[in-house]
Image (spheres, grey):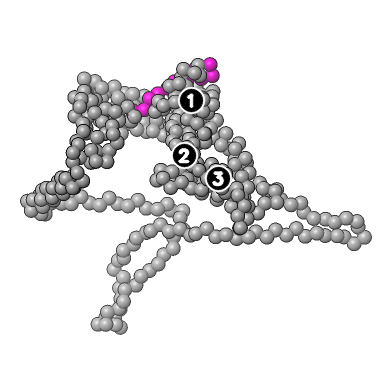
Amino acid sequence: MERSRYGTSSERLGISGLTDEQCAFVFEEAESGVGDAVADLEAVAPDRAKRAPRPRKGFAAHLERVEQIIEPEVPEDCEGLDRLLIGEDVSERLDVTPAKFRVIVTRRPKYAYRNHDGVFQAPAPAHIIESGIPTERLLAQVAVSKFARGAAALSTGNHLCPRWRRTQPRADGPMDGKIGFELRPLADYLLERIRQAERVFAGETSLPTLAPGRGKVRKAWLWAYARDDQPFGGTAPPMVAYRFEDSRGSECVARHVAGFTGILQVDGYAYTKLAKASAGTNDAMTLAGCWAHLRRRFYELHISGASRLASQTVTTMAGLWKVEDEIRGHYPMARMAARQDAYFRRS
């Protein structure tokens, strides 16, 4: 019913002619029936044991702790009596200290010596932005706020201010776009390290971008390339590199993964063309499909009851997921043995 009301056209079940009042009535009846069933179960087994709450994972030990003790008021009939501490309840909450802006004043005294010609002064320290107002710490904070924390904003649809706007003069000082130029070698090195991996995961997503000078939003694309060998028993640190492009064409990913000779796991959009068009530069690269994307099509047929084969496929895949959950993080030979054992047991 929810898919019929809110789902995309491909997910709707063909239920037509229902008004909003009729749909609301169906949901109210279902909720009422569930409530009655729960009440009956509680009446039959009122003393059944409830599942113990999961213990909350503590915060990292290196974080600063600020303790506050809340003492109870002394009852009137207990004034003057000795008080004994028999226990306490302790809770922790995560707090943050807002960023504090300050002005760094740099003085370089000039000296002259008696009976000696010349003026002596220490040279000015080098800065990313010569004669600029922001310090390197402020530039780092801007970069982290825009790019590192921007991923969370993208996932919720709250897009942060584009970098080009940060380069425009403001009343509190100009922000120059040179930080991107200075960080480019680091970004290139990160992508190069990812291309050295045995397997790389690639994907792309649309990124609404404000066009400078036009006042309009245009669609751009953010390509992501990640390596993470931890689920495969590897010890290399996980990392991800991003590339911003105005296009979603296969020529973008061909340029990003030039020279890569491992396994590229993709969802199959622009990468199939890459396999055909890049035989000269990436002839040793192997494309691997995504189980999640493949399962999605079978699941849509399964929930609509349109295909018994799709339902059987989804059930079989559920067994695969269970095996993968158990062997994740083990070495390749152990994972292969577990998969083969599960296959022979099912057959």
Q: CA distance from mark 2 to mark 3?
A: 13 Å
Give the answer, above or below, for where 66 lies relative to 79.
above
Q: Residues at badges 2 and 3 in contact (C-beta under 8 Å)? A: no
Q: CA distance from mark 1 to mark 3?
A: 26 Å
Q: Which mark is residue 236?
A: none
Residue shown at the point (27%, 50%) measured from the top left: 54
Instruction: Look at label 1 and name its amino acid.
Output: Ser
Q: Which residue appears farthest toward the left when viewing the image?
A: 44
246 magenta-colored: no
Instruction: Look at label 2 and name its amino acid.
Output: Leu
Residue shown at the point (25%, 82%) measured from the top left: 77
Residue 280 coordinates in the image, percent (x, y): 53, 16
Residue 14 coordinates in the image, percent (x, y): 21, 33
Q: Residues within 10 Å of mark 2 (few under 14, many from 20)?
A: some
Q: Residue at label 1? A: 250
- Whichever of callouts 1 and 3 sits on the residue coming sooner in the sequence is 3
